[in-house]
């Protein structure tokens, strides 16, 4: 469905950076299923016994979609603790 979205959406359909997905070979070390990415996103499929932490304890498989590129800002997405937590109370 995600690949179909990129192939059909006029904004992306003629741009191979978005329509071609590549296998993330690094994910084979810790996931049963390979992850795939294009310029904008990275898609991982976690099995029921993978990728769990304290806030993610359920016996079901799930999909993780990570944003890699912001096309509106025309730059790679990077995590900043300051930007992520500024203005929010933590307990």
Image (cartoon, helix red, strand yellow):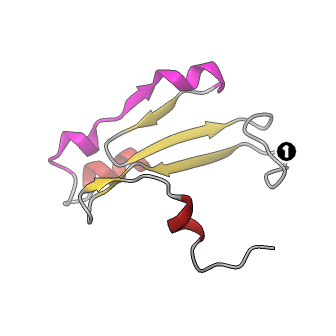
- The answer to whether residue 14 is above or below residue 82 is above
Residue 88, percent across and down?
A: 64, 78
Residue 22, percent across and down?
A: 37, 29
In the image, farthest residue toward the left: 14
Disc 1 crowd, CA 10 A, few/some/many (<14, 14-19, 20+): few
- Where does label 1 land, which residue? 59
Residue 31, percent across and down?
A: 65, 27
What's the residue at 29%, 36% (across, down)? 20
User: Residue 58 colored magenta?
Assistant: no
Residue 34, percent across and down?
A: 54, 27
Magenta stretch in the rendered image: 13-32
What's the residue at 85%, 44% (across, down)? 59
User: Residue 30 colored magenta?
Assistant: yes
- Left or right: residue 39 versus residue 85 is left
Looking at the rendered image, the quarter that the C terminus falls into is: bottom right
- The answer to whether residue 33 is above or below residue 89 is above
What's the residue at 23%, 41% (across, down)? 17
What's the residue at 60%, 27% (across, down)? 33
- The answer to whether residue 29 is above or below residue 58 is above
Along the viewing direction, whichever of 72 and 7 lies nearer the viewer: 72
- Left or right: residue 11 versus residue 36 is left
Secondary structure, mark 1, is loop
Location of residue 87 by image quarter: bottom right
């Amino acid at each position: 469905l995600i690949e179909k979205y990129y192939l059909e959406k006029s904004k992306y359909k003629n741009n191979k950076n978005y329509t071609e997905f590549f296998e993330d070979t690094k994910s084979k070390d810790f996931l049963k299923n390979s992850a795939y990415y294009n310029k904008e996103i990275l898609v991982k499929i976690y099995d029921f016994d993978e990728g769990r932490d304290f806030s993610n304890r359920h016996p079901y498989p799930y999909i993780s979609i990570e944003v890699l590129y912001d096309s509106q800002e025309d730059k790679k997405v990077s995590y900043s603790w300051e930007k992520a937590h500024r203005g929010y109370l933590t307990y």
